[in-house]
Image: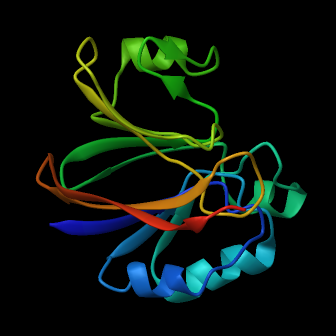
Amino acid sequence: MVKIGLLSDTHAWWDDRYEKYFAECDEIWHAGDIGSVQVADRFEALKPFRAVYGNIDGQELRIRYPQHQRFSIENTDIWITHIGGYPGRYAREVTPEIYIHPPQLFISGHSHILKVLYDKTLHCLHINPGAAGMYGFHKKRTLVRFAIDKGEFKDLEVIELADNR
């Protein structure tokens, strides 16, 4: 079993509570719009860190992280991207691949809206962790924690950090 801390859209914002809430996690995953190399460095110093770049990320982050990450962990096919859409409304860029070869877990950011949805057509769990940074229209800053155990998703928690105003 592996415990995951998931967030997106930090937009160069660091909150010391990331360390607290991800202390028990084995890995931290970031679904793009990290915002600065300094924030990425801090996550990398905490735990094994997987990330994708987002639309606001500069060249340094685009060199360091891919646009899409697809990997297997705990016998589970995972796909992380920043602009991915939602079940029934996937982004054009991911649509062909997601329908031909759907992952078991599809993670995206970008919208700043926390959503956890199951795509019954693709038999795929979709998670958008919302936004953990201060920039954007979202009213709550959110993180997600969950576990993956041999293809099963367990103990999913949503953490609200604070109002974004």
Q: Could you say which is closer to the camera, residue 70 or residue 47?
A: 47
Q: Residue at x 60, y 62 (%)?
A: 132
Q: Is residue 158 left or right of residue 69?
A: left
Q: Residue at x 63, y 52 (%)?
A: 139
Badge count: 0
Q: Quadrant of the N terminus?
A: bottom left
Does residue 121 show up? yes
Q: Quadrant of the C terminus?
A: bottom right
| Quarter holding residue 157 | bottom left
Q: Could you say which is closer to the camera, residue 126 or residue 150?
A: 126
Q: Is residue 27 above or below residue 92?
A: below
Q: Please state the horizontal and vertical placement of residue 63, each as a whole percent of the image.
A: 78, 58
Q: Is residue 24 above or below residue 80?
A: below
Q: Is residue 35 left or right of residue 154?
A: right
Q: Is residue 152 above or below residue 90?
A: below
Q: Is residue 93 left or right of residue 105?
A: right
Q: Please state the horizontal and vertical placement of residue 137, each as a whole percent of the image.
A: 73, 45
Q: Please state the horizontal and vertical placement of residue 11, each as a whole percent of the image.
A: 76, 61
Q: Is residue 76 above or below residue 63?
A: above
Q: Could you say which is closer to the camera, residue 80 or residue 164?
A: 164
Q: Is residue 27 left or right of residue 90?
A: left
Farthest residue toward the right? Answer: 59
